[in-house]
Image (cartoon, rainbow, N blue to C red):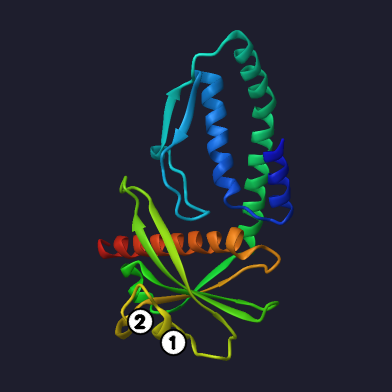
């Protein structure tokens, strides 16, 4: 009950992550317990609250031997939890979809540098009157099938204090100062009523990842036309 209460509090504030990832694991686990009598878990170490959970990250284990009393409690717990986990998973999915509709990503500079799969993106919060600037890097996951976009916040401050290029040149940690003009720059936008860290930022990263992957795929196709 305490976990479901925590979910209610998070969703009331439109915080999508890490609840979406947690619910995905719980949902898969309960289905495996019901259908196979095995529990599903992961040994993956999460670095960010919005880290993706892939099928390849999951492993199944047999449940411990239970007494009749324990087995009865176990079955009642599954019966109670399964529909609730499913409902909360759908709530998280709905909020994700709602926020995703409000998010936009625009490539502002250096389209020809997308192939480098790293660069910068910025977001201006009009309510706070603060500019946020991140550097990003796209890498293949271990299974070499999916990509992951990691980001690093390099600046938060007034929009008028520094130019975007000054911010990138002075504060970038992943890229060399003399090379910062040679990478793609995105502007990201989203409704300010949503939390930045738990909701907007994860969506920004995914939209940039999709933009890069789609653009590079189109470029590769045109090479062979």
Q: x, y (%) of residue 221? A: 31, 60
Q: Quadrant of residue 131?
A: bottom right
What is the secondary structure assignment of the residue under circle 2? helix
Q: Where is residue 34 in the image (x, y as percent from the top left)?
A: 56, 21
Question: In the rendered image, which quarter contains the C terminus?
Answer: bottom left
Counting from the top left corner in percent of width and height, residue 161 is at: 55, 91
| Above/below status of 118 relative to 31 | below
At label 1, counting other C-alpha atoms closer than 10 Å, the crowd grade (few under 14, some 14-19, many 20 or more) is: few
Q: Mark 2 points at which residue?
A: 180
Q: Quadrant of residue 196?
A: bottom right
CB atoms of marks 2 and 1 within 8 Å: yes
Q: Position of residue 160 (x, y in %)?
A: 58, 91
Q: Quadrant of the N terminus?
A: top right
Disc assigned to residue 214: none
Which residue is at the front of the view, 52 or 225? 52
- Residue 165 is marked as 1
Q: Residue at x 70, y 39 (%)?
A: 2
- Residue 215 against residue 41 in the figure, above or below: below
Count the numbered circles shown. 2
């Amino acid at each position: 009950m305490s976990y479901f209460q925590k979910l209610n509090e998070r969703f009331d504030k439109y915080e999508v992550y890490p609840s979406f990832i947690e619910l995905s694991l719980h949902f898969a686990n309960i289905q495996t317990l019901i259908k196979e009598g095995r529990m599903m878990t992961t040994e993956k170490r999460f670095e960010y609250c919005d880290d993706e959970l892939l099928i390849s990250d999951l492993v199944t284990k047999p449940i411990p031997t239970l007494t009749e009393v324990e087995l009865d409690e176990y079955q009642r717990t599954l019966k109670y939890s399964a529909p609730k986990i499913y409902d909360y998973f759908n709530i998280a999915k709905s909020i994700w979809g709602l926020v995703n509709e409000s998010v936009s990503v625009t490539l502002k500079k250096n389209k020809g540098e997308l192939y480098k799969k790293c660069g910068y993106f910025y977001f201006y919060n009009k309510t706070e009157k603060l500019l946020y600037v991140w550097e990003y890097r796209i890498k293949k996951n271990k299974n070499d099938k999916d990509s992951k976009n990691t980001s690093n916040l390099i600046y938060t401050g007034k929009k008028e204090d520094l130019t975007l290029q000054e911010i990138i040149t002075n504060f970038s940690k992943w890229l060399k100062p003399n090379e910062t003009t040679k990478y793609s720059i995105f502007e990201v936008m989203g409704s300010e009523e949503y939390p930045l860290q738990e909701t907007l930022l994860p969506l920004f990263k995914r939209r940039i990842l999709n933009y890069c992957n789609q653009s590079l795929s189109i470029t590769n196709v045109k090479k062979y036309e």
